Amino acid sequence: MSKQSLKLSQKKDIPEGWKEVQVGDHFDFKNGLNKAKIFFGQGTPIINYMDVYPHPAINKKNIHGKVTLTNDELTSFEIRKGDVLFTRTSETIEEIGLTSVVLDDVKKTVFSGFLLRARPKTKLFELEFKRYCFRSKNARSQIISTSSQTTRALTNGKLLSKVFVLIPINFQEQKNIAESISDIEKLIDTLEILIKKKKNIKQGTMQELLTGSKRLSGFEVKQGNKKTEMGIIPKDWNISYFENHFDIFSGIGFKKSEYTQNGIKLLRIDNVSYETITWESEAYVPIQYLKKFPKIVLEEGDILLALNRPITNGKLKIAILEKKDIPSILYQRVGKIIFLNRNDDEKFLFYVLQKYIKKFVEETSVGTDQPFISTTKLKKLKLLLPTNPKEQILIGKTLSDTNELIKQLDYLITKKKNIKEGSMQELLTG
């Protein structure tokens, strides 16, 4: 791609007090250090790919990698305050050329071969501004469009040198822009810390309330506990079985030739995540299938469970279908769980299922690369339940309210991230 075709100024007037510059006129690029695995784990600090990819800035306290070096290697691959590191290679082209600026004086620190170091050779770029200017929409589109991809996505210093960025000449304006974006990031970070705290509280509360080790107000029992095969439990709680409260069946398989460009969404195993349904991967079948396969037509409130690889990142892939997820049809390897007893509280039992099915999978899939859930064995799964329906309802509401708060915080974070993206687009183009 030619220098001329990359320039933003061809499409839009440059704001007063700003100019468009080519990265190679202000930075020199160098590839990072490559060494055998035996040299890693001790020695000199090294900045790795994951120190850069999610973070626009690097501080001394965030560098955890170590590598054994020669003096020549230390000199050749040293890092200084103000250096900008670019991701050089990745599995996907969208992760190429992401940047992080070194904000601290880091002595005797190097960078890995998955990165490129851009060392400033002019003083045009203010330190904090470098956190964001290379992550702007315009810069990212140029970096992605010039990268190559075979088995892995790649870029290099020669390609990155040709990228153009818009920059205000005034240092204070650069700093003000960086501070504005940073303020939004700090708010997002605060919300993410709060969500993590709420999720930890939720997990602890679930463990206590679903085993009877903690009782809610009005259900404290003075008669004590009893010893059972599932441990010590309250005397007014009983052991029951999955099949006493639920039935479960899976969907059916469709040939690729049956798929259509639009129609009814096919709910597949990839669509089931922890407590939510996602549609990043979509497939459709003809609308006539609603009448042809009525048993596998899904409705709002259905509980769905991934039967293959049911645990991801320590979370059970189980979710309640929402209004936004219908109309849809159930595919094979996804289980639909049906309530059998009208007296059972559905919210409460949804959390019971999370706890005991996850434990069931973990115990039955030891040494298995691709764990799956046998619906026959699942029906014999033991559950621990309070006998009082009112206690079920209150436990379900308590956990559901906590979950709703977490969802609201998740939504707020998404909203703030969208605001950040919009602000970056406006501020980094003047």
Image (tube, rainbow, N blue to C red):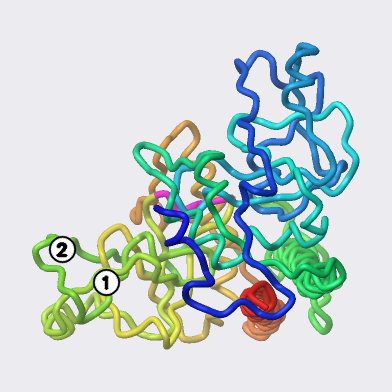
Residue pointed to by mark 2: 254
Q: CA distance from mark 2 to mark 1?
A: 9 Å
Q: Quadrant of residue 349?
A: bottom right
The reply to whether residue 400 is in sight is: no
Residue at 65%, 80% in the rendered image: 426
The reply to whether callout 2 and callout 1 are in contact (CB within 8 Å) is: yes
Q: Quadrant of residue 17?
A: bottom right
Q: Nearer the viewer, residue 114 or 279?
A: 114
Q: Residue type at mark 2: give it.
A: Phe
- The front one of 173 and 35 is 173
Element under disc 1: strand
* In the image, residue 123 above or below residue 289: above
The quarter of the rendered structure image containing the C terminus is bottom right
Q: Tell me which residue sits at (57%, 80%) in the image.
A: 13
Task: Please name the residue shown 36% across and 37% down the image.
Answer: 151
Residue 175: percent from the left, percent from the top? 84, 68
In the image, residue 82 sits, relative to residue 426, either above or below, namely above
Residue 255 drawn above or below residue 198:
above
The majority secondary structure of the magenta stretch comes to loop
- Residue wearing tag 1: 266
Residue lying at 76% horizontally and 16% vertically, measured from the top left: 68
The quadrant holding residue 211 is bottom right
Q: Position of residue 129 (x, y in %)?
A: 77, 62
Tell me the SS state at disc 2: loop
**In the image, 67: left or right of 323?**
right
Q: Earlier in the sequence, mark 2 or mark 1?
A: 2
Task: Tell me which amino acid carries mark 1.
Answer: Leu
Judge left or right: residue 197 versus residue 349.
right
The region drawn magenta spans 309-313
Residue 371 located left or right of residue 47: left
Is-magenta flag for residue 191? no
